[in-house]
Image: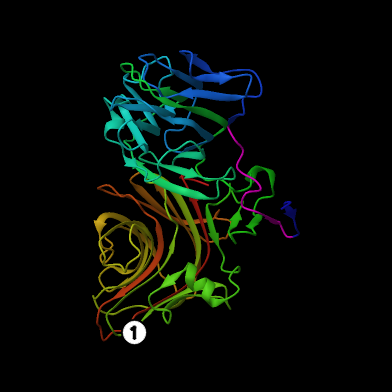
Amino acid sequence: MTIKYLDSKRINGLSTDIVETVTFSDDFSGADSWTDTGTLTGVNISTDVIDWSGVRDNVNQSTSFDLTTVSDTVFSLRFKLTISAISGGTVDSSHFVFMGLSSTAGSSISSSARDFIGLAIRRRVNGTNDFRAIDGDGISWDDTGAVASPDATFSTVPSATTYYIEIKRTSATVYTINIYSNSAYTTLTETKSGVCVATNSSLRYILIQNYKESVETSSFNGTIDDIQFWNGVSLHNKPDSTTVQTNSLFTETDTGKILWSGNGWATFSDDFTSYTTQALADASWVSDDTTNQRVNITDDNLFSNNNGASTIQKVIYYDLTSTSDTAWVLRFKSTLGSFTARTDTNTQHTNVTISSSNAPSDTVSDWMGLTWNTHTGLGNIYDVGGKDNTGISQFNGTYFTKTLVNGETIYVELKRNGADITANLFSDANYTTLIETRTKTTTGTITSLRYLKVTIRRTVTTSNGIINLLLDDFKFWNGVSSV
């Protein structure tokens, strides 16, 4: 489908039409800029591919390319992998080939200590061939190191066919390897994720290398082509935000996904105008009580009604799938449609958080976010916080001096920067006029935050406090701490 530029800063196209600007790409049709060691792995200028060998021949067979500088938190590497042969041999030993990013070039043999993230393919003469997700911080990638205890082993069995590989680092401590069956990287065969240490860094070399070990005969070889590398980017299939007007909307007509170009493309945005039926809205924003919390497709907002004299815990959530464990930004519009202060010391609050759980607030989880709280002792306040493996029943964060005001609209910005969660309250939709800011430095290890959720909680009372919110214009950026 041809990309269509419409009026009012609207753009339509398929999810596969365009991608972020690539940092490095090579289809090997030009000059050979890779550094080879050995004779079996390297750029073939006659066929315009990298030939690779995974056979154990006691020779370092490798090729590498120096990217010079690579982000220690977010990157993406894609390439076409063809396995030409994976068979033969008489001795029950393992043959391996590594493909990924490394802190050292191919001149360092497989048993050398290095930092790395990548894919290892094993050929086992009398066993099962497999793909393995591996990483290491100052260790070897081969059978003496990481490959012996991989982060994950794929169920997909490598065979003489073509695969499309994507290796993504999504934070300082998380990476994902995806195996696709098509060149558009849309038909996923299998995905695996691994956890690495934050000191796994300086991965400046794209490396393809065999396991240098005693000679064992086997047929284990293939080619690599169409390498693409994005630095600082782990998500694709979205427009280059620098080439369109700020606040443009790109609609992927095949997926229904809408992207917003303000300050770089937001990973997720929702102003609730795209839902043509209530069922579609309910499928995206899942509520356990649609009477009190639901997307309203008539008014194009999300309402959250926290009122009544009964004990209650309710949740509505949207699954972001995954977020960085170190950096993200969430923005949204909040209107306090109806507010009545509570006159006793029982608990009543509404929270907007990003959490590891999609359950109500008392459920143990990792989370970061903002609360609207009415309480005789604490007051009627905003509060920012985050905790590791704890419910949201008691926020215990960092309190604002600003109080809740009936009918007031504010624009909320939540920013994660490592262990710090900052809440900025603005009075304008451009997020320029700051009312107040507060930062909470969290403790523990807060990870795997994937659910954007709104929770309400109150305990039995004869004093009926009311916190009714109207939420709109959600925008989320992953892997950055400012926009």
So how many labels did they put on this image?
1
Q: Residues within 10 Å of mark 1 (few under 14, many from 20)?
A: some
Q: Is residue 451 visible?
A: yes
Which amino acid type corresponds to the residue marked 1 in the rendered image? Gly
Residue 320, quarter of picture = bottom left
Task: Name the element at disc 1.
Answer: loop
Using the image, determine if residue 7 lies above or below residue 16: below
Position in image of residue 430 (x %, y %): 58, 56
- The front one of 387 and 364 is 364
Whether 460 is among the magenta residues is no
- The front one of 158 and 210 is 158
Position in image of residue 154 (x %, y %): 37, 43
Main SS of residues in magenta: loop
Magenta span:
8-23
Using the image, determine if residue 100 lies above or below residue 168: above
Q: Residue at x 50, y 28 (%)?
A: 222
Q: With 206 as the anchor, is 241 left or right in this view?
A: right
Position in image of residue 322 (x %, y %): 42, 52
Whether 13 is among the magenta residues is yes
Position in image of residue 186 (x %, y %): 55, 49
Residue 258, quarter of picture = bottom right
Q: Residue at x 35, y 18 (%)?
A: 212
Q: Is residue 68 visible?
A: no
Disc 1 designates what residue?
A: 308
